[in-house]
Amino acid sequence: MKRRVPVFATAVVLAAVAIMIALGFWQLGRKAEKEALLARYEQARGIAAAVPWPGSPDAYPAALYRRSRIDCARVERVEPVSGRSNEGRAGWAQIAHCRLPDGRVARIALGWSAQPEPVFWTGGEVGGIVGPAGKSGIRLVAAPAQAGLRDLAAPDPSNLPNNHLSYAVQWFAFATTALVIYLLALRRRWSASSSD
């Protein structure tokens, strides 16, 4: 008996497998981009010259892991978030939300404390290292710490995740699994039709 391959189902499976393989290669490309970005950030850590505080989100990447200074004209609030001290102790980073002289708002990680109660800080000029804050923001990690706090751990680009290789492996595994399952289903179908 002639073994027939269902055209539509085969086309759908092959299209899905091709998409998964393409996504795997896309993740490999993203891995290379991320490694280049991390290398650039690591190089930026060694530059002693300060950069102006970035005026827009487009300028954030060029300022990350560089030294900068800002003038906190008015402290709007101070809030604790989880953070690590320079010695690696878990505790609280005290984050000041500051209004700058030009009206923009900046976040300053004033320093580390063992207790979550917000500290009192009146503002002023402060220097430190520009670090990431969330998915699309930045903050200045004060160095030295302000408001009688201890130094926070300096921003470190090695803490940024680079999971693209594992994502690529997952996409290739999904493609292989889909192909194997489809071939097993075809084989079962052929076996059932030959026994009839």
Image (cartoon, grey):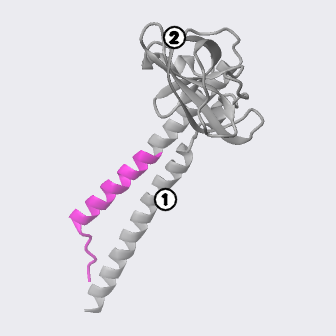
Name the kind of residue labelled 2 in the image: Ala
Instruction: Compare marks 2 and 1 and give the one earlier in the sequence.
Output: 2
The reply to whether the magenta stretch includes residue 2 is yes
Choose between 118 and 71: the one closer to the eye.
118
The image quarter containing residue 13 is bottom left
Q: Specify few, some or many for label 2: CA neighbours under 10 Å numbering under 14, 14-19, or 20 or more.
A: some
Q: Which residue is mark 1?
A: 173
Q: Secondary structure at mark 2?
A: loop
Side of 96 where 3 appears, left or right: left
**Quarter of the figure with the N terminus:** bottom left
Residue at the image position 61 percent from the left and 13 percent from the top? 68
**Quarter of the figure with the C terminus:** bottom left
Taking the view exactly as shown, the residue that stands out farthest to the right is: 87
Q: Specify few, some or many for label 1: CA neighbours under 10 Å numbering under 14, 14-19, or 20 or more.
A: some
Residue at the image position 40 percent from the left and 46 percent from the top? 22
The reply to whether the magenta stretch includes residue 180 is no
Q: Which label lies toward us, 2 or 1? A: 2
- In three-dimensional space, the C-alpha distance between marks 2 and 1, rounded to whole angstroms, equals 54 Å
User: Which mark, residue 73?
Assistant: 2
State the extent of the magenta-drawn residues as a range: 1-24
Residue at the image position 59 percent from the left and 36 percent from the top? 160
Choose between 160 and 79: the one closer to the eye.
79
Name the kind of residue labelled 1 in the image: Ala
Residue at the image position 40 percent from the left and 70 percent from the top? 181
Choose between 54 and 73: the one closer to the eye.
73
